[in-house]
Amino acid sequence: MSLKLVLEQKLTQQLIMTPQLRQLIELLPLSLLELENRIQTELENNPLLERETPPDDLVSLESRQPAQKKNELEDVEEWLRYLEESPTHKPFSQLPEDMYIAEPSREPGLRDELEWQIKISKLSPREKEVAWKILGNLDNEGYLRLSSEELEQVTEADAPTIEKVVRAIQRIGPPGIAARNLVECLLIQAEVKYPENYALIEKILNVTLKELAAHRYQDIARKLKRDEKEVMAAVNQITSLDPHPGQEFLDPCRYYISPDAEIVEEDGDYKIIIN
């Protein structure tokens, strides 16, 4: 085995913590009182350090600040007295409503819309309480992901009551809302939009879902013993359904936080990427 000396050029990015940078990081989060105590401690421990006196112009500026603030306060008080003595001055409570500044309204979300529908529904007060608890557990896409046991624990209701309320929410909300899974979501929409072809759509989704996902339409027709044209018509109707019925009610005013830096792993080594 032979040893060779190889000269190669490699460009890497490293963050080096210099003593000045480390000291700066330690001082930045300190409050004014803590910073003053830190300076006093350093002066006592290091006899070579000395405190510098501020320039004369800065001292004179600080000495003028109290008087300046006093004059500004007097101007404000004089202006308030002028307003109170003015014959056209009115308190804020007596101003006309059209002079109020209206705050920007928030677009109603999915739960806002469903809560309003439940308030005007014919459900009993107890069923409305169950409905509001169910609404609180819908995800942003409108699905009800909780199991039956979890729903009974959250709503403190029995299974028949929960099922009745869930069906009511599915009827009053956008088609597909409060479904437990994708198949139920699509079936609820198909029952509303395509009642004449619902039986075939139900068989395709419940019996031949794997063939549908793989686009094996001939296998679907052969398995269900239906004409391929009828199957293709039903498939086109299924593809027109919305698998995310709650997205149209998502809040458009969202704020996403972008990190200042990211740490990624490449070939067993970690790198810092500054955004």
Image (cartoon, rainbow, N blue to C red):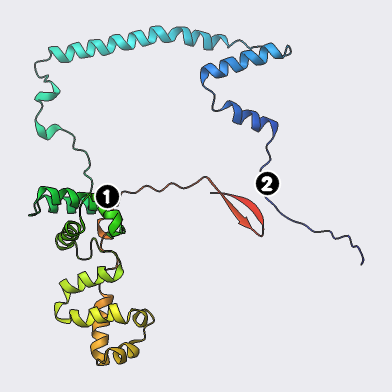
Q: Amino acid at mark 1?
A: Val
Q: Is residue 45 above or below residue 126?
A: above
Residue depicted at 21% across the width and 44% down the height: 105
Identify the residue under disc 1.
154
Q: Amino acid at mark 2?
A: Gln
Query: Closest to the observer: 101 or 41?
Result: 41
In percent of width and height, residue 214 lies at 39, 81
**Mark-to-mark CA distance, 1 and 2:** 51 Å
In percent of width and height, residue 258 lies at 46, 48
| Residue 109 appears anywhere in the view | no
Q: Is residue 263 above or below residue 103?
A: below
Picture quadrant of residue 175: bottom left
In percent of width and height, residue 104 lies at 22, 42
Q: Quadrant of the N terminus?
A: bottom right
| Residue 79 appears anywhere in the view | yes
User: Mark 1 vs mark 2: which is more N-terminal?
Assistant: 2
Front disc: 1 or 2 = 1
Counting other residues with Cα less than 10 Å from the Cα at mark 2, is it few (<14), some (14-19), or many (20 or more)? few
**Image label count:** 2
Q: Is residue 100 above or below residue 252?
A: above
Query: Closest to the observer: 266 or 230?
Result: 230
Q: Residue furthest left?
A: 122
